[in-house]
């Protein structure tokens, strides 16, 4: 009876204790799901988007399965991507800790994989990574005025875009101050050259009913906002 009670308590604390699934760390997920084009030694390698889509399709979670492309949501797509992931799981270099497909497709782990995919896609713009050459050319710091309202009818994606636009306006203001950090100047140029087009694309995709593309642009805007917040914090710390 005491043993049964202990098992029940363990189940109440965490479902993984009863289901037998294990939760990989962010680093283990990054190694297992890294893009095939990425350098295995690169700690910030971009994750493979189709692999994360596949885990969403197999997660059994209705929220995670929303707006999946046919390549991952159809019966053939699910079978094909599962076969690919099974190969990665069997690869000792990718999966030295021998996580199973059930471990990786657990909803809690899939949600973390989605977050890692979004953050890894914009990692090159943060920290001390080199700035793309296109952003290092001499040019005046552009002024940037964020639109006053979020794009109409775009929900969470529109709110993410508006936040990115507001933060980029703050970056542009700080970059215009004499002696501003070169990274602020470079990022201000990046914002000026990209955010206007992002809003236009998001509105066009919304009008055509392409919610998947709208959500993808929202993820990009969220990553951009995260990098902007980090740069603003660094500039405040340096003052």
Image (cartoon, grey):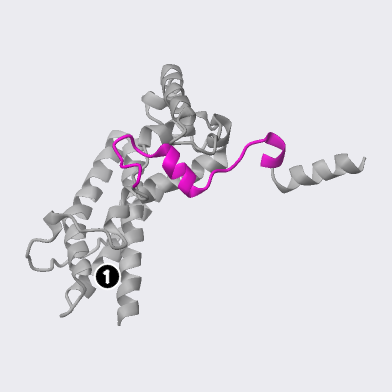
Residue occupying image coordinates x 54% and y 43%: 24
> In the rendered image, which quarter is residue 237 located in?
bottom left
Q: Does the magenta stretch include residue 226?
A: no
Residue 163 seen by the camera: no
* Secondary-structure class at tag 1: helix
Q: Quadrant of the C terminus?
A: bottom left
Please provide percent x and percent y for residue 191: 21, 59
The image shows residue 29, relative to residue 193, as above or below, that is above
Residue 41 seen by the camera: yes
From the viewer's perspective, tell me whether residue 120 is left or right of residue 146: right
Please provide percent x and percent y for residue 213: 31, 38
From the viewer's perspective, tell me whether residue 231 is left or right of residue 73: left
Residue that protrudes farthest toward the bottom in the picture: 239
Please provide percent x and percent y for residue 226: 36, 59
Q: Give, as a single range, the part of the protein colored magenta.
A: 15-41
Q: Which residue is label 1 attached to?
A: 170
Residue occupying image coordinates x 32% and y 53%: 123
Q: Nearer the viewer, residue 225 or 206?
A: 225
The number of callouts visible is 1
Q: Residues within 10 Å of mark 1 (few under 14, many from 20)?
A: some
């Amino acid at each position: 009876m005491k043993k049964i009670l202990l098992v029940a308590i363990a189940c109440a604390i965490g479902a993984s204790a009863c289901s037998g699934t294990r939760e990989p760390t962010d680093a283990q997920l990054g190694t297992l799901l890294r893009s095939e084009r990425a350098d295995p030694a690169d700690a910030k390698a971009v994750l493979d988007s189709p692999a994360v889509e596949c885990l969403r399709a197999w997660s059994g979670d209705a929220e995670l399965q929303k707006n999946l492309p046919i390549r991952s949501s159809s019966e053939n797509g699910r079978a094909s991507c599962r076969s690919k992931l099974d190969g990665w799981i069997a690869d000792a270099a990718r999966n030295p800790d021998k996580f199973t497909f059930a471990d990786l497709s657990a909803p809690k782990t899939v949600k973390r994989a989605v977050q890692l995919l979004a953050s890894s896609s914009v990692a090159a713009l943060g920290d001390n990574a080199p700035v793309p050459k296109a952003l290092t050319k001499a040019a005046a710091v552009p002024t940037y005025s964020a639109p006053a309202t979020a794009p109409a009818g775009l929900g969470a994606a529109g709110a993410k875009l508006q936040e990115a636009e507001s933060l980029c306006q703050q970056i542009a203001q700080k970059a215009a101050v004499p002696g501003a950090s070169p990274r602020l100047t470079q990022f201000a140029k990046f914002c000026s050259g990209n955010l206007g087009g992002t809003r236009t694309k998001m509105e066009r995709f919304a009008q055509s009913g392409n919610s998947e593309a709208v959500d993808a642009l929202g993820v990009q805007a969220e990553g951009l906002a995260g990098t902007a917040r980090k740069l603003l914090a660094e500039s405040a710390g340096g003052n």
